């Protein structure tokens, strides 16, 4: 069975997602099409990369992942198809791949050949879908086009360790549906620097000195009454990133970590060891 996932910035109001699925199913009605997300902020390649990176490994090997975010381009900037970590990715060459894989993790990458008319509108339907159909049918990636000699990279600020102040410095990179704040500090970064020392997680005026293994553990160990709702917590999420949140927060009613602390993507966060 062929499997294709979709990640787009199309939203759910318009016809674009349905039309794209229709094209894929017209070729092979037995194709399994899974929506990862269609709520990516318009043109937000970094948001798309975090979401896809967090879940693509949960799909079977050989899955084809269409990432149609900021997907319109020109024939001078062709889309790319990439094979990495036993999965295929089809997307515009605008930095998505550089945020998911290092260059040495990419096994194959090609520019997708397309007719000039295919660039006129809705390129996910006219270009990306054709490449996905080819790959999901077992076609070789090399037949899609010439080898890609340049994968565009988005330069983002990485996690930095300040040796003088024993401080691991990172940034907030994503705000989830609950208003929880995801950082670019990974568990492996934290463990490598901690060396059994105490620590404080610091952002704005907030200081946190404990990291929990799960939401359930926080609720079980922290609560002194019957409810821990609204309390601040830190944990490493299922993708291995340090996350800050309010337990059982609701951005639409009682508020969330992002609204309470007025945090935006790219704001600083640090872990001080002592």
Image (cartoon, helix red, strand yellow):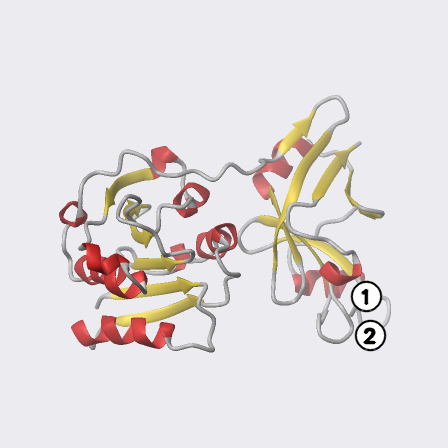
Residue for badge 2? 226
| In-front residue for pair 213/96 | 96
Q: Judge by depth and name the residue closer to the eye, 237 or 35.
A: 35
Residue 248 quadrant: bottom right
Local secondary structure at mark 2: loop
Quarter of the image for residue 68 reads bottom left
**Is residue 223 visible in this depiction of the protein?**
yes
Quarter of the image for residue 34 reads: bottom left
Contact flag, marks 2 and 1 (Cβ < 8 Å): yes
Residue 83 percent location from the top left of the image:
28, 46
Q: Quadrant of the C terminus?
A: top right
Residue 202 vs residue 179: left or right? Answer: right
Q: Residue at x 39, y 39 (%)?
A: 152
Q: Residue at x 72, y 39 (%)?
A: 270
Identify which residue is drawn at 56% across, 49% down: 240
Is residue 28 among the parts visible in the rendering? Answer: no
User: How many numbered circles are shown?
Assistant: 2
Q: Residue furthest top?
A: 164
Residue topped by disc 1: 223
Q: Judge by depth and name the residue closer to the eye, 222 or 99.
A: 99
Residue 46 spot, x, y in % from top left? 51, 50
Please report the residue visible at 28 percent of the width from the left and 47 percent of the height from the top: 78
Q: CA distance from mark 2 to mark 1?
A: 7 Å
Mark 2 is surrounded, within 10 Å at the Cα level, by few (under 14), some (14 to 19) or many (20 or more) other residues, namely: few
Dividing the image into 4 quarters, which one contains the N terminus? bottom left
- The label shown at residue 147 is none
The image shows residue 261 at horizontal and vertical percentages of 78, 56
Image coords of residue 198 (percent x, y):
78, 37
Mark 1 closeness class: few <14, some 14–19, many ≥20 residues within 10 Å: few
Q: In the image, 114: left or right of 65?
A: left
The secondary structure type at the circle numbered 1 is loop
């Amino acid at each position: 069975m062929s499997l294709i996932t979709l990640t787009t910035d199309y939203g759910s109001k318009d016809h674009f997602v349905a039309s794209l699925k229709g094209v894929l199913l017209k070729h092979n009605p037995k194709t399994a099409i899974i929506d990862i997300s269609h709520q990516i902020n318009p043109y937000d390649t970094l948001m798309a990369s975090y979401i896809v990176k967090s879940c693509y490994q949960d799909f079977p090997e050989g899955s084809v992942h269409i990432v149609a975010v900021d997907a319109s381009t020109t024939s001078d900037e062709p889309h790319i198809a990439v094979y990495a970590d036993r999965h295929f990715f089809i997307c515009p060459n605008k930095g998505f791949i550089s945020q998911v894989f290092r260059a040495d993790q990419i096994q194959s990458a090609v520019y997708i050949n397309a007719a000039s008319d295919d660039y006129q509108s809705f390129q996910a339907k006219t270009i990306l879908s054709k490449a996905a159909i080819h790959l999901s049918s077992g076609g070789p990636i090399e037949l899609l086009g010439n080898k890609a000699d340049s994968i565009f990279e988005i330069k983002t600020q990485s996690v930095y360790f300040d040796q003088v102040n024993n401080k691991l410095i990172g940034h907030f990179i994503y705000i989830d549906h609950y208003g929880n704040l995801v950082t670019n500090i990974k568990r492996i970064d934290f463990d490598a620097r901690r060396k059994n020392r105490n620590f404080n997680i610091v952002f704005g005026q907030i200081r946190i000195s404990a990291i929990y293994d799960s939401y359930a553990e926080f609720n079980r160990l922290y609560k002194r009454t019957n409810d821990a709702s609204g309390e601040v917590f830190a944990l490493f999420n299922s993708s291995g990133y340090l996350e800050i949140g309010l337990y059982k927060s609701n951005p639409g009613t009682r508020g969330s970590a992002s609204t309470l602390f007025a945090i935006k993507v790219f704001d600083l966060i640090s872990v001080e060891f002592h």
